[in-house]
Image (cartoon, rainbow, N blue to C red):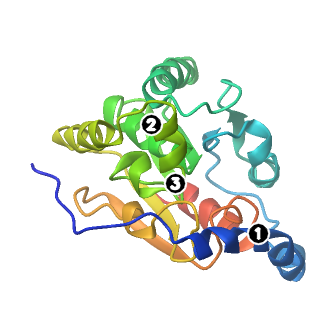
Amino acid sequence: MPITYDSIEPPHRLRVLQELRLPIDAVRWGGAWRRIRRERTERPQLVVLVPGFGATHRSLLPLGAFLRRLGHEVSDWGLGRNTGNAQALLEALAERVTERARKAGRAVSLVGWSLGGYLSRELARDHPEAVRKVVTLGSPVIGGPRLTALARWYRSRGYDLEEIERLVAERYATPLEVPVAAIYSKRDGVVAWEACIDRWSPNTRHVEVTEGHFGMGFAPRVWSIVAEELESP
């Protein structure tokens, strides 16, 4: 199946600068954090959290603490900092997730932020037997780094962005069978929001939020959506 899409550009520079609003947003979320759900889930899941480019497991500690409080069994990805080397990280993460699923005797749910969400989706594509569900936060599913604010960084280090884009599209030849909840925002200043829309995988459900890219991992509304998605099939 050929993967084609209209011309999409990386986020405008002004949109990138708006990501600096995170401290202001955090103050605005204060009341919502106090009202956030407290009751434990009746469907606890095995959950692995996968950080975005340049981040470590620490970026997802607050979300992980929230999910544990609800009764989920949460672990980090165990690979340190996300270096951006998608292929190497995908292979290492697949080994860890498939082993955890094997030992537990049931599939794992993956929650990935940005590039971490892309890795989670592709792991599920390759190992559907080991993954129950994927929830992504501001994750590009087409275009690779070219449609992100990091395009220049990747180019400066010798990455061929057009080749990466082609390889990303080629992976759609293998259907994505695992359900995916794709959380995206038109305020995203890191990933072009259009690049987060998967028009080729019927099992993908899109959920729009108003937070910026860096706010998604900390916003109470996003946490609530993640919790709801983990409980649904």
Q: Please state the horizontal and vertical placement of residue 113, each as a whole percent of the image.
A: 59, 50
Q: Please state the horizontal and vertical placement of residue 116, each as a whole percent of the image.
A: 55, 42
Three-letter amino acid code of the residue under disc 3: Thr
Q: Which residue is depicted at the point 46% across and 27% down?
A: 90
Q: Nearer the viewer, mark 2 or mark 1?
A: 1
Instruction: Determine whether, in the image, residue 104 is placed left or right of residue 223.
Output: left
* Callout 1 secondary element: helix
Label 3 packing within 10 angstroms: few (<14), some (14-19), many (20+): many
Q: Which label belongs to residue 131?
A: 2
The residues tagged by marks 1 and 3 sit, at their Cα atoms, a distance apart of 22 Å
Q: Which residue is depicted at the point 38% across and 61% down?
A: 195
Q: Nearer the viewer, mark 2 or mark 3?
A: 3
* Label 2 vs 3, first from the N-terminus: 2
Three-letter amino acid code of the residue under disc 1: Leu
Q: Please state the horizontal and vertical placement of residue 155, each as a whole percent of the image.
A: 45, 39
* Callout 3 secondary element: strand
Q: Which label belongs to residue 20?
A: 1
The residues tagged by marks 2 and 1 sit, at their Cα atoms, a distance apart of 34 Å
Where the C terminus falls, by quadrant?
A: bottom left
- Residue 129, by quadrant, is top left
- Of 203 and 150, the residue lying toward us: 150
**Is residue 90 depicted above or below 165 in this figure?**
above
Q: Which residue is depicted at the point 82% across and 66% down?
A: 38
Label 3 sits on residue: 136
